[in-house]
Image (spheres, helix red, strand yellow):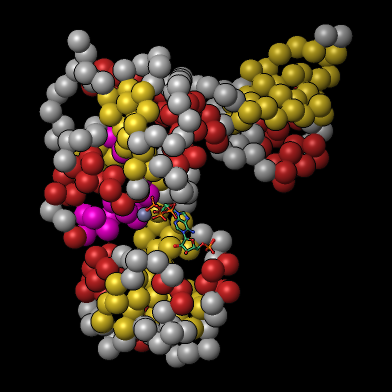
């Protein structure tokens, strides 16, 4: 009997939906609703453990799960403080739940750079990363560990500055804080043990990894179709973002126009379409790509 691949996914929160969505796009089908600790894929030998994100490095490190989907910030914090977590590695960057760990201080205060933190107190849920960052800069400061609501610490005079995750920046702004330094850039990542022993589930892991790479690549990739005046073809090709070899086809009954079809591996902005139109491209269509095996 082949053993089942075990993947740890956040049960609810910012990584839960993106994580499940990715796994479903990789072809996994699940029978139950989202409220179970354990979900069994119906069509592949894969089991999911639905847990708190903070527990995921431990689940994977201990071998209870083979893979986990976690914020790079959580992995890096674990690695800054636990030797076992250093045995973990990023198998794949997943391209969602992007955020940055930033140092921030009151907008109207005097802390405007890392140097100003000497002798101050910094509130954070990331004590390991914050301490390492300060040590690398030769700054001695007190770290006040908080589990949540870090952004209120300066107002409550628990700390002079904070080190917290930021995505839109709205939380900092609402609390009268301003970021002045980035400690870590993060996104969701797939993790596994570095020196994983060979196991029966390796084959299924490899299939899923390949599919996941395809899903991630296709999320950024678009299929562009347009009609181009034959004499403007070179200029139009040069504008197609990340397209190496477009297909050029005849348009029935026209000598002055050709059809161009291209897979664009970079983001396609409105500005690109407007530039294409300016060069004479017409009937421009941008289509999403659902699946891709390169
Ligand atoms: O219950 P569990 O422990 O599983 O969940 P959690 O509450 O610890 O985690 P959750 O779901 O909030 O976040 C999971 C992961 O999402 C994090 O580890 C990050 O990798 C990622 N992520 C992306 C974020 C954010 N963006 C984010 N903005 N995690 C938290 N925030 C918080 C931040 O701490 C701050 O309070 O959102 C606030 C700032 O947001 P903005 O948009 O106002 O800047
Ligand atoms: Zn958490």
* Left or right of residue 173, residue 12 in this image: left
Q: Quadrant of residue 210?
A: top left
Q: Residue at x 54, y 68 (%)?
A: 171
Q: Quadrant of residue 240?
A: top right
Q: Where in the figure is residue 166, as x and y percent of width and height?
A: 48, 63
Q: Nearer the viewer, residue 271 or 152?
A: 152
Residue 1: x, y in percent? 20, 10
Q: Residue 252: percent from the left, percent from the top?
A: 83, 9
Q: Is residue 214 visible?
A: no
Magenta residues? 67-80
At 39% from the left edge and 34% from the top edge, which residue is drawn?
A: 36
Q: Residue at x 55, y 36 (%)?
A: 220
Tell me which corner region of the image, top left, top right, bottom left or bottom right, holds residue 154.
Answer: bottom left
Q: Is residue 83 above or below residue 228?
A: below
**Residue 245 horizontal side relative to residue 250, left or right:** left
Q: Position of residue 191 (x, y in %)?
A: 29, 40
Residue at the spot 72% in from the left edge and 43% down from the top edge:
270
Q: Between residues 186 and 173, which one lies in front from this camera angle?
A: 173
The number of numbered badges drawn on the structure is: 0
The quadrant of the image that shows the C terminus is top left
Residue 44 shown in magenta? no
* Ligand 2, image quadrant it occupies: bottom left
Placement of 158 over or under 192, stated as above or below: below
Q: Considering the whole magenta stretch, tell me its main secondary structure.
A: helix
Residue 60 appears in the figure: yes
């Amino acid at each position: 009997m082949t053993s089942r691949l075990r993947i740890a996914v956040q049960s609810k929160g910012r990584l839960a939906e993106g994580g499940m969505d990715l796994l479903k796009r990789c072809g996994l089908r699940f029978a139950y609703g989202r409220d179970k600790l354990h979900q069994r894929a119906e069509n592949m030998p894969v089991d999911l453990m639905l847990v708190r994100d903070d527990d995921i490095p431990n689940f994977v490190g201990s071998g209870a799960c083979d893979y986990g989907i976690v914020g790079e910030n959580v992995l890096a914090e674990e690695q800054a403080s636990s030797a076992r977590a250093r045995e973990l590695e990023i198998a794949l960057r997943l391209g969602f739940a992007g955020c940055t760990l930033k140092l921030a201080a009151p907008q109207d205060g005097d802390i405007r750079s890392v140097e100003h933190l000497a002798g101050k107190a910094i509130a954070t849920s990331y004590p390991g990363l914050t301490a390492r960052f300060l040590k690398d800069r030769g700054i001695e400061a007190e770290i006040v560990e908080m589990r949540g609501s870090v952004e209120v610490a300066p107002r409550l005079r628990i700390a002079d500055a904070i080190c917290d995750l930021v995505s839109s920046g709205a939380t900092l702004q609402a609390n009268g804080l301003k970021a002045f330094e980035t400690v870590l850039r993060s996104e969701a990542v797939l993790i596994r043990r570095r020196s994983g022993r060979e196991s029966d589930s390796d084959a299924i892991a490899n299939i899923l990894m390949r599919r996941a790479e395809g899903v991630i690549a296709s999320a950024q990739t678009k299929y562009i179709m347009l009609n181009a005046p034959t004499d403007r073809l070179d200029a139009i090709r040069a504008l197609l973002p990340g397209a190496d070899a477009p297909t050029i086809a005849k348009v029935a009954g026209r000598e002055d126009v050709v059809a161009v079809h291209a897979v664009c591996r970079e983001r396609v902005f409105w500005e690109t379409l407007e530039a294409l139109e300016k060069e004479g491209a017409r009937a421009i269509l941008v289509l999403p790509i659902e699946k891709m095996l390169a």
